[in-house]
Amino acid sequence: MSRIHLLPDPLVSQIAAGEVVERPSSVVKELVENSLDAGAGLIEIQLEGGGKARIAIGDDGSGMGRDDALLAFDRHATSKIASFDDLERVATLGFRGEALASIAAVARVEMTTAERPGEGHRVVIEGGKVRVAEPFARPRGTTIDVRSLFFNVPARRKFLKAPQTELRRCVEVVQGYALARPDVRFQVFHEGRELLDALPAPGTAAGSRERIGQIFGPELARELAEIPESGGGEEAIRGFVGTPATARGRRHFIYVNRRLIRDRAVLANFYRAVRDEWRSEDFPALFLFLDIAPEDVDVNVHPQKAEVRFREPALLDRIYDALRRALERARGEEAAPLRPPAAEPYVPFAWQGLGERKSASSWDRPRESPAVPALVELPVTPTRLATPSYVPVERPIVPLSGRSGEARPFRLLGQYKGTLILLEGPDGLYVIDQHVAHERILFERLRRAMAAERPPVQHLLSPVLLDLSPAERLRINELASGLEEHGFAIAVLSGGTLALTSVPAVLSADEAERLLRSLAADSGDGTAGADDLSREILENLAASMACKAAVKMHHPLSAPEMEALVAELFTAEQPYACPHGRPIVLQMTDSDLERRFGRR
C-alpha cells in the first residue's frame, strides 16, 4: 500500500486555519476587513473573555443573499477576484476567500446577513459543518458571531495568552483600521463595557487628525505636522509626523491603500530621515498613508497580508524626501526661499582659519573676469574655532584593582578633548569613554539601591494626565500590580484618561511619565511575571537616571577624578559596556601599535 495519502477535508481546513487564524485578534482583523470591503459605515465589535470566549462583529454594509451566505464559508470562495489579472491589481482588503472558512473550521460561528431590511438569512456552522441555514429578519448588513475559538484544537488554544493580553491585541487591530478609515464609526465593547467609540470624521487631512485625537488624545493630535502631499497620478504620499515631544511612545503606523502593514524598508527610511534631519535617535510619532496604483504593489506575499512589495524601488526615495520635509515642519523649520538672480554685488566667500584673517595675496585675490561683476570687500570679524586645550597630566603609576582584587598597574596619561581617558597599561594603550564609564557606575549603584527595598514614594500635588489609546490603557492595566509595587499610583478618570498620582521618589514626574508611556507602547505578550516586570522597571529606571546624571562629553576632569572613576569602573559587574550596550573600554595592544608603525 502507498504510504502517501490525501488528508481529510476537516484536517486540511484546520491546518489552513493555522496560517490565517493565529489568535482572537486574527479573527477581528479578517472580519473587520470584510465589513470595510462591504462598504460599512458602522462597525461594532463585541468581545468576551478577551476574544477567546466570543467575538461578534456587526456592520451596516451590503450584506449577502442566501446562496452567497452559504458559499462564503467554502475555502477560496470570494467575490473580489476572478482571475490572475484581478489578483495583480487587487484593491480590496480581503481577496483570498480563506478567512471565513478558516474561522469556521476552528470555532462555532453564527452569521446573520441581509441585503434588504427584513429579508435576511441565518447560518450556523460548528467545526466546519453547517448546522443551520434558515431565513432571518434583520436590518441590512452582516453580523458574524464567533464563539469558543479553537474548541476543537486544544493544542492551539492552550498557547493563547491571558484574556487581558488577547483583548489588547484585538483593540490594537481595531485602532489600526480606525486610523485608516476616519469616515467609518468603530465601536468596541468588552463584556458590556465600552472601550472605544471612534465617531466618523471627514475623509480629509483634518478628519485624519481628528481620528488620531479620538484614539490617542487631542494632545498628540496637536503635536503633529502634516506631511506635504506629494506624488502624481494615482500615487499620493500623505500623513503626519510628530514633534520631538511625541517620541515618548512608539506610535508608527504605515498604510498602503488603507491597509496597515509592517514594512521594514519604509520604517528604515523613516529612521534615516530622522537621523539625517534631526541628528537624533528619538523617533517621533508617524502616521503615513500611501496611495498607490494597485498594480504597483504586491499584497499577496504574507499569510496575514501584513507585508507588501513595491514594484518601483524609487518610491522609497520619494517617501524619504517627503518625510524629511515633514520633519523640518515638525521642528518649526521651513526652507528659506532661494534669492532670485539679480544684479547684486558679488561677495566672495571669506576663508577663515584657526587664527586671524590673512591679508590678500596673489593666490587668494579673486581673478579678474569680464563675466564676474566688480568685487565688493566686506569687513569680516576674525573668529577662532572652538578647539579646547587640556594640559597633559603628569601622574605616577596608580595600582587599580579589579573585582578579583588583583592589582593592575596603570599610568594615567591624561584626557583627550575632555571626552576620553587615556591609560598606559602593562600590555597596551587603554581608551575609556568617560560618559559611558560613569553611566555604568551610576547604573549599578542605582540598581542595587532600588532593589534593596521598596523605593520611597512621592505623591504629586498635580497629577500627570496620560492620554493613551484604549490598547495602551489595557497594557498599563496588565502591569498595574507590578507598577504599584514600585511606587506608581494610577487612577482612572472619566473618559478613560489615566492620572498618575504617585511616582518613585528617585524619579521626576516627567521621567515617570516617559517610562509609563514607553511601557504602554510595548506590545509584548504580557507573559512576563512579577520578577521580570520588576527587573524591567528597575533596569529602565536605573539606566535612564544614570545616563542623565553621568558626566558629559567635553567635560574636563582632574587627575584624581579620573583615577577615582577608573578605579570604580574596574570593580563593576560589567566594566566593558554601558546599560544601553555601547562599549566603554577600547584597547590597542603593544603588538597592534607595533604593526601600525611597521615594526612587525
Image: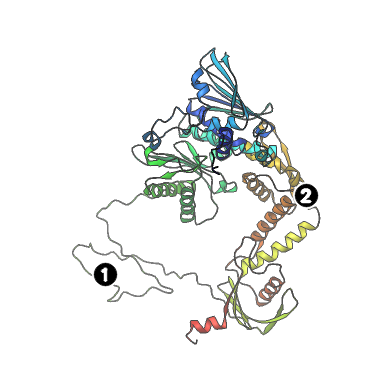
Disc 1 on helix, strand or loop?
Answer: loop
Q: Quadrant of the N terminus?
A: top right
Dot 1 amino acid type: Pro
Q: Which mark is residue 189?
A: none
In this view, 40 is above or below 6: above
Q: Quick check: 431 left or right of 77?
A: right
Q: Residue at x 63, y 30 (%)?
A: 107
Residue 372 sits in quarter: bottom left
Q: Please tell me which residue lies in front, 531 or 86.
A: 86
Question: What is the x, y in percent for residue 406?
Answer: 73, 79
Residue 498 sits in quarter: top right
Question: What is the x, y in percent for residue 49?
Answer: 69, 32
Q: Which mark is residue 457?
A: 2
Dot 2 amino acid type: Val
Kindly give the residue lying farthest to the left in the view shown: 370
Q: Which residue is mark 1?
A: 366
Q: Please tell me which residue lies in front, 136 or 91.
A: 136
Question: What is the x, y in percent for residue 456?
Answer: 79, 52
Q: Residue at x 63, y 73 (%)?
A: 557
Residue 469 visible? The answer is no
Q: For the residue carrying disc 2, how many other residues have a C-alpha within 10 Å: few (<14), some (14-19), or many (20+)?
A: some
- The alpha-carbon separation of the residues under discs 1 and 2 comes to 70 Å
Q: For the residue carrying disc 1, how many other residues have a C-alpha within 10 Å: few (<14), some (14-19), or many (20+)?
A: few
In this view, 10 is above or below 306: above
